[in-house]
Image (cartoon, rainbow, N blue to C red):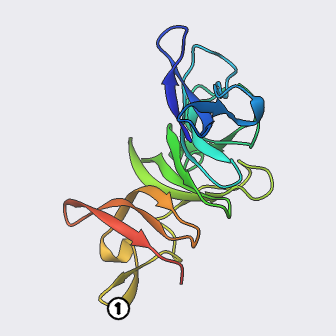
Amino acid sequence: MVGKSQHSVGTSYHAFRSREDGFGAPLPLNGLSDDQGTATFVDAHTSEGFDINSFTEMVGASQSPAGQYRAMYKAPFTGKHQGWSDLGVLGSGASAGNWSAAYAINDQGLIVGQSTIKIGSSYQTRAFVVGNAGNPGSQPMLELTAQAWVFLSQYGTWHTAASQGWTLISAERINGNNWIVGYGYKSGQYRAFMLSPR
């Protein structure tokens, strides 16, 4: 299990990764502390864990050395402050976002979540997918609304999300078959979406 808990020093909170001992009490994984620390190695900073897969790969968010709160991957069986990889933000250069969070990871290493991207003079949130293949954080985040390969099914006909007026704001979960669920904006309303592999 993963989550976040207030740290003993100050008002910050840290991600935790733990397991249950069979009697209802949490135990640290592999004898390591369940306190996962932060990507900055600073106790006064904040992190959180959102999901864990069968290989104990964790995803979440942490303050980053760059000073932003960013989507993070944490390697299995790594101790406090160790094993964090920054997954980045959507966009680059002048369009780069300033915040992101990873909400789910499946056993294939696909990670989904939400990031800001700068459009014009404002930051807007968008759903993303990224892989942890190779070195986590080395793959670019892909914004789901903008991808030509992302299709939504409506009455049995496939369409790109953008062509149907969708703005996919957050990807919340991904399962072992790579189905993605989340929420977006269409026709002036927030709506749930589901993306299935073709």
Residue beneath the point at 19% across and 61% down: 188
Q: Quadrant of residue 190?
A: bottom left
User: What amino acid type should be assigned to the residue bearing mark 1?
Assistant: Gly
Most foreground residue, 13 or 87:
13
Judging by the rendered image, the residue that carries numbered circle 1 is 156
Give the percent coordinates (x, y) of residue 66: 64, 28
In the current view of this chain or complex, which residue is farthest to the right? 134
Query: Along the line of sight, which residue is nearer the eye, 95 or 90?
Result: 90
- At a point 67% along the width and 29% down the height, the residue shown is 39
Which quadrant of the view contains residue 67?
top right
Residue in view at x 71 percent, y 55 percent: 132
How many residues crowd mark 1 within 10 Å: few (<14), some (14–19), many (20+)? few
In the image shown, does 136 or 75 lie closer to the viewer? 75
Say if residue 137 shows up in the picture.
yes
Residue at the extreme front: 23
95 displayed left or right of 54:
left
Residue 186: where, in percent of width, then height? 26, 65
Expressed as whole percent of the image width and height from the top left, the position of residue 14 reads 56, 25
Tell me if residue 131 comes above or below residue 103 in the rendering. Answer: below
Secondary structure of the residue carrying numbered label 1: loop
